[in-house]
Image (cartoon, grey):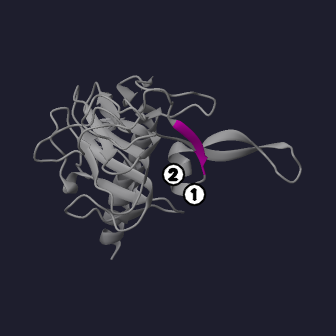
Amino acid sequence: MKKILTLLAMAVLAISATAQDQEKVLFDPEGTYGNGATLTSENTTLVLGNNHPTKNYDKKLQTGKAYCYDLFGQTVLIENTETEEMEEKTRIVIVTGQNNPMDGAEFDDSGKSTGSSYNPETKNLPQSGTYYTITPKKAGHITAYIVLNADKKFYVTKSDGTALAVSDLTLKADGEEASEVTLSDNYTTSVKVNGTVEFDVEANETYYVFCNGSKLSLGGYVFTPKGGGSEPSGIFGDLNNDGYVNISDVSFLINIILGKGN
């Protein structure tokens, strides 16, 4: 029992170290974001796509629940309409573009994006409209906050236009706890998603994040380097051998303890 408790304590310590290794990229509640706006963390770069010839991305304070507030929530000042006083609230800062993503680099006379929507067969990446690119310096895992409308084809692609497989994407709806959302074989969901998308990333690859026929909202992301960082303690804590150190490793150990107790 002493050995098991020691393992559990070390796993928790490793997971705490991993939490410190996680890098968050969030939008500033007071910020303004136009074409090519760039946000960085130690090991990642986020670039906003070529959205509109004259307008910035719209910014909004999104309400959420425990799951997404824990990951993306920020303390902001909001006026109480009854007292007219400013109060601190937790919100998720999201941005949304003006145009649907298309493969034309130019805009028409009315400021609309031009060309065609992305097709996995032709790999025609968007060059105008609402899309986002994330480039990590290290291999790891991205958890991004998105607002995705139902029945819109949602893609994460590599820089050569290759779409990540449906099986490589995990969508979760916000709530007191996360609940997984099914992404169909044609890359659509039957419900609107206010929540997250997760996917693994390779070092120095650029990933495009967008949806066809709509304007995907983004609320930032969390990047976890593979293995939980470069420290040996992070590798040690990977009890379930999935290449990451997180709460699932504690669950894994608890299940072992319970299993031996039966």
In the rendered image, the residue lying farthest to the bottom is 262
Q: CA distance from mark 2 to mark 1?
A: 6 Å
Q: Image quarter for residue 138?
A: top left
173 horizontally vs 213: left or right: right
Quadrant in which the N terminus is drawn: bottom left
Q: Residue at x 28, y 55 (%)?
A: 153
Q: Residue at x 38, y 46 (%)?
A: 11
Q: Is residue 3 visible?
A: no
The correct choice, above or below, for 144 with respect to 203 in the image is: below
| Badge 2 vs badge 1, beta-carbon distance below 8 Å | yes
In the image, 232 versus 146, the foreground residue is 146
Residue 184: x percent and y percent? 24, 64
Residue type at the position of mark 1: Lys
Q: Which mark is residue 68?
A: 2
96 horizontally vs 103: left or right: right
Q: Residues within 10 Å of mark 1 (few under 14, many from 20)?
A: some
The residue carrying mark 1 is: 65
257 horizontally vs 207: left or right: right
In the image, 51 versus 54, the foreground residue is 54
The correct choice, above or below, for 55 with respect to 211 in the image is: above
Q: Residue at x 65, y 46 (%)?
A: 90
**Which region shows up in magenta?**
58-62
In the rendered image, the residue lying farthest to the right is 83
Dominant SS type (magenta): strand
Quadrant in which the C terminus is drawn: bottom left
Q: Quick one: SS at disc 2?
A: helix
Residue type at the position of mark 2: Cys
User: Count of labels shown?
Assistant: 2
In the image, 58 versus 72, the foreground residue is 58
130 horizontally vs 90: left or right: left
The correct choice, above or below, for 241 with respect to 125 in the image is: below
